Amino acid sequence: MTHIMRLVVLGDPVAHSLSPRIQQAAFDEAGIPGIYTARRVDAAGMEQALAELRRGELDGANVTMPHKRLASRLVDQRAPDAERSESVNTIVRDLGILIGHSTDVGGIRSAWSENGLPEQAPVLLLGGGGAAAAALLALEGSEIFISTRRRGAGRALLERVGVAGEEVPWGAAVPGAVVANATPIGMNGESLPSGLLEQSIGLLDMAYAATPTPAVRLAAGLRLPVADGLAMLVGQAALSFQLWTGRTGPVQAMRRAVETAQGA
């Protein structure tokens, strides 16, 4: 009897997630029987889902905001990027052992290079959660400025992850830097603090919605190189698919699923 892989994305909110479309397209393209669904969960729901993984009722999972750091505490083992960032967005089941990975790191790197963002440019990173931790690892070696709405949270994240950088006040621009938004700002039509993009040289926006975020539209209007959240989503999704199946993620099919969802 053919085994049907059962996978899930866990988060809150999660109804907006395109991961089910992307991963279902990947399984279909690869000819692997699989069902990928979205599940809105709180902390207790996370623990329940991981129990299902351990029992083999699920074969793998993605984790999105706000549970990436919680996932890093709940898994049995963590890959090096997940260990450093204390952020897990992909869970692999291996003989009942749950291994946490951060494919966000590779997703950020691929989105950055594929969309022409300047390499080694200064970076103004917005956010202090799991996505920001992954961004710190992906961009390590660049001159990094970090800005969080809660004062001191940026410095604490730099110390925890072990990446060199400088904290700047929320809303302060860094002229000549690429803005990397690792907050949910934009998912519901919110704008980044005014003046940030006007003084920047590019944008990586990890937030995404049914239509381009205000930050992506503004950066495009300023003719800046832009990597949007969908570019990063496909990059990390391909790496997750490979971890679950041992096969290279069919990136073109995954991109087509995004374009179809966006009405492109």
Image: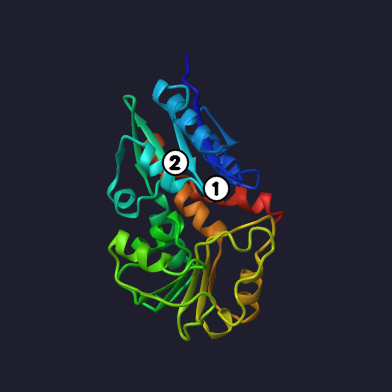
- The image position of residue 3, as x and y in percent, is 46, 20
- Label 2: state its secondary structure: helix
Taking the spot 53% from the left edge, 39% from the top edge, the residue there is 9
- The image position of residue 31, as x and y in percent, is 50, 32
Q: CA distance from mark 2 to mark 1?
A: 11 Å
Q: Is residue 173 above or below residue 34?
A: below
Kind of residue indicated by mark 2: Phe
| Residue matched to label 2 | 241
Q: Taking 170 as reference, is 84 left or right?
A: left
Query: Which of the 4 image quadrants contains residue 240?
Result: top left
Query: Crowding near pointer 2: few (<14 within 10 Å), some, many (20+)?
Result: some
> Nearest the camera: 184 or 31?
184
- The image position of residue 54, as x and y in percent, is 39, 25
- Label 1: state its secondary structure: helix
Mark 2 near mark 1, Cβ–Cβ under 8 Å? Answer: yes
- The image position of residue 25, as x and y in percent, is 57, 40
Outermost residue to the front: 151
Which quadrant, please, contains the C terminus? bottom right
Taking the spot 62% from the left edge, 82% from the top edge, the residue there is 222
